[in-house]
Image (cartoon, helix red, strand yellow):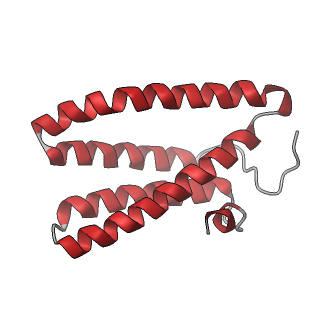
């Protein structure tokens, strides 16, 4: 399903933006509706959209760099992701200690900002030849 979305007419950047904004909506709904059935459904949708987001991101990242710089660009992007992944639990732990809902709303806000920024990505790589 994810590979279908990556190659759909929406294009890579729109699949990225929609799945990221959808993930933020799921996080918000998760904090508002506390019934176990709703949280189970929202968790499943969130996981699906997160997989769409990451699958498309890895496709887009490798295609956006020229071939001569692709390994450097992908390595740089991966290292930024690793640093963020190492610091996120510390920041999340601090926020959860204060209030769980603050942590979820901060995460949702970051996803909203990221999704909106993805709309303004300058390149669409779907259907483009490799440079």
Q: Is residue 70 above or below residue 59?
A: above
Residue at 56 percent across and 47 percent down: it is 118
Q: Is residue 54 left or right of residue 65?
A: left
> In this rendering, is residue 19 above or below 37?
above
Q: Is residue 8 visible?
A: yes
Q: Quadrant of residue 74?
A: top right
Asked whether residue 22 is in view, the answer is: no
Instruction: Say which residue appears at 48% left-offset and 49% top-offset.
Output: 116
Residue 32 in the image, given as x and y percentages of width and height: 18, 63
Residue 59, position as x, y percentages in the image: 68, 48
Vertical placement of residue 131 versus 53, above or below: above
Give the residue furthest to the bottom: 37
Q: Is residue 131 left or right of residue 1?
A: right
The quarter of the picture where residue 36 lies is: bottom left
Residue 75 in percent (x, y) is at 65, 27
Q: Residue at x 88, y 39 (%)?
A: 131
Is residue 115 toward the left or the right of residue 90 in the image?
A: right
Residue located at (76% from left, 34% from top): 65
Count of numbered circles in the view: 0
x, y (%) of residue 4?
68, 68
Q: Quadrant of the N terminus?
A: bottom right
Residue 42 location, quadrant: bottom left
């Amino acid at each position: 399903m994810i590979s279908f979305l990556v190659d759909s007419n929406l294009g890579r950047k729109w699949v990225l933006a929609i799945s990221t904004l959808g993930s933020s909506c799921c996080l918000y709904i998760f904090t508002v509706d506390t019934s176990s059935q709703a949280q189970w459904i929202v968790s499943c949708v969130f996981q699906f959209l997160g997989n769409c987001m990451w699958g498309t991101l890895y496709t887009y990242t490798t295609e956006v760099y020229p071939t001569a710089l692709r390994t450097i660009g992908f390595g740089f992007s991966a290292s930024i992701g690793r640093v963020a992944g190492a610091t996120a639990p510390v920041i999340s732990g601090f926020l959860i200690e204060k209030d769980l809902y603050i942590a979820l709303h901060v995460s949702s806000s970051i996803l909203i900002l990221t999704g909106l920024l993805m709309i303004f990505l300058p390149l669409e790589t779907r259907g483009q030849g490799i440079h």
